Image (cartoon, rainbow, N blue to C red):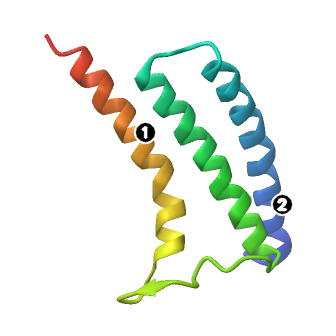
Amino acid sequence: MEMGGSAVVLGIQLLVGAVATFLAILLWSRTRDAAWMFIVIGTVAHYGALVFSGLELLGLVALDGLVFAGVPLGRVLISSAPMLFFICAFVIMVARNRV
């Protein structure tokens, strides 16, 4: 995908992600449930990953700066953090609903 196409896709993702993050923050102020807190944190972390992708596309940050065994640690951390928060939320929900 050329630079213009990826910029449009990223722009749409940022717009939709901003709405989801805004709604997640509204939910955050209304709930004290641990599982929902992790869902909210995962959504905010996902939006942060999108922002970093945009900054990388503009050449303002380099996510490949720290490499260990050929693996860019910054890119791995930013891309997997949201899913780790979602996993925590789902584990809490499964443990809570176990009969």
Of helix, strand and loop, which one carries label 2? helix
- Residue named by callout 1: 86
- Foreground disc of the pair 2, 1: 1
Say the numbered circle drawn on residue 21: none
- Bin the neighbour count of mark 2 within 10 Å (Cα to Cα): few under 14, some 14-19, many 20 and up: few
Side of 21 relative to 5 (left or right): left
In this orientation, which residue lies closer to the viewer: 57 or 8? 57
Residue sitting at x 77%, y 40%? 18
- Residue type, mark 2 in image: Val
Q: Give the quadrant of the N terminus.
A: bottom right
Amino acid at pointer 1: Phe
Q: Is residue 99 above or below residue 83?
A: above
The residue that mark 2 highlights is 8
Q: Which of the two labelled residues, at mark 2 and mark 1, occupies the earlier sequence position?
A: 2
Quarter holding residue 70: bottom left
* Closer-to-camera residue (50/5): 50
Q: CA distance from mark 2 to mark 1?
A: 27 Å
Query: Is residue 91 toward the left or the right of residue 48 in the image?
Result: left
Q: How many marks?
A: 2
The residue at 80%/77% (across/down) is: 60
Residue 84 vs residue 31: left or right? left
Residue 71 at x, y percent in the picture: 42, 82
Residue 96 in picture, x, y percent from top left: 25, 16
Disc 1 crowd, CA 10 A, few/some/many (<14, 14-19, 20+): many
Q: Is residue 29 above or below residue 17?
A: above
Q: Position of residue 26 (x, y in %)?
A: 70, 21
Q: Secondary structure at mark 1?
A: helix
Q: Quadrant of the C terminus?
A: top left
On the image, the x and y values in percent for residue 48 come to: 66, 53
Residue at 56% over, 32% down: 40
Q: Looking at the picture, does residue 85 appear above or below residue 92?
A: below
